[in-house]
Image (cartoon, rainbow, N blue to C red):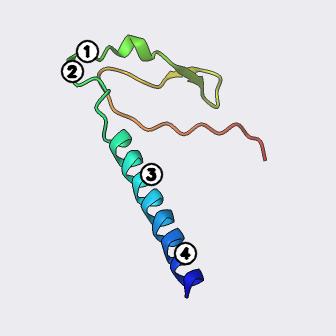
Amino acid sequence: MEDHKEEAEHVKRLWMSLVLMMLAVVIAACGNNEATDYEAYDASDYNYALADSTGSEVNLFTEDEKGLYLYFTGVG
């Protein structure tokens, strides 16, 4: 009977530790350290270009249009 009580206490501590760790992860994930001012976005900070199939450079981020670019390296 003693062993059963000790095992139950161990399981209870294990669950409490797991719950506390999960709570810490949720609190850390909900932190607000992101920029909230969307006016501070500057497209020139994100000036990336990739070569297309003809060798021309394609700018990935432009101010006037939205687009999705998929880039394949050709590695099989």
Residue behind mark 3: 21
Q: Are marks 4 and 3 in contact (CB under 8 Å)?
A: no
- List x then y, in percent, for residue 50: 58, 24
- List x then y, in percent, for residue 55: 65, 22
- 4 or 3: tag closer to the N-terminus: 4
Residue behind mark 1: 40
- List x then y, in percent, for residue 4: 55, 83
- 1 or 3: tag closer to the N-terminus: 3
Q: Are marks 4 and 1 in contact (CB under 8 Å)?
A: no
Q: Is residue 22 left or right of residue 10?
A: left
- 3 or 2: tag closer to the N-terminus: 3
Which kind of residue does numbered mark 3 sit on? Met
Q: Are marks 3 and 2 in contact (CB under 8 Å)?
A: no
Quadrant of image for the N terminus: bottom right
Query: Of discs 3 and 2, which sits in the foreground?
Result: 3
Residue behind mark 4: 6
Residue behind mark 2: 37
View extreme (top): residue: 44
Q: Is residue 43 left or right of residue 75?
A: left
Residue drawn at the location 51% of the way across and 19% of the way down = 48
Tell me how far mark 2 sits from mark 1, CA to CA. Answer: 6 Å
* Helix, strand or loop at mark 2: loop
Which kind of residue does numbered mark 1 sit on? Ala
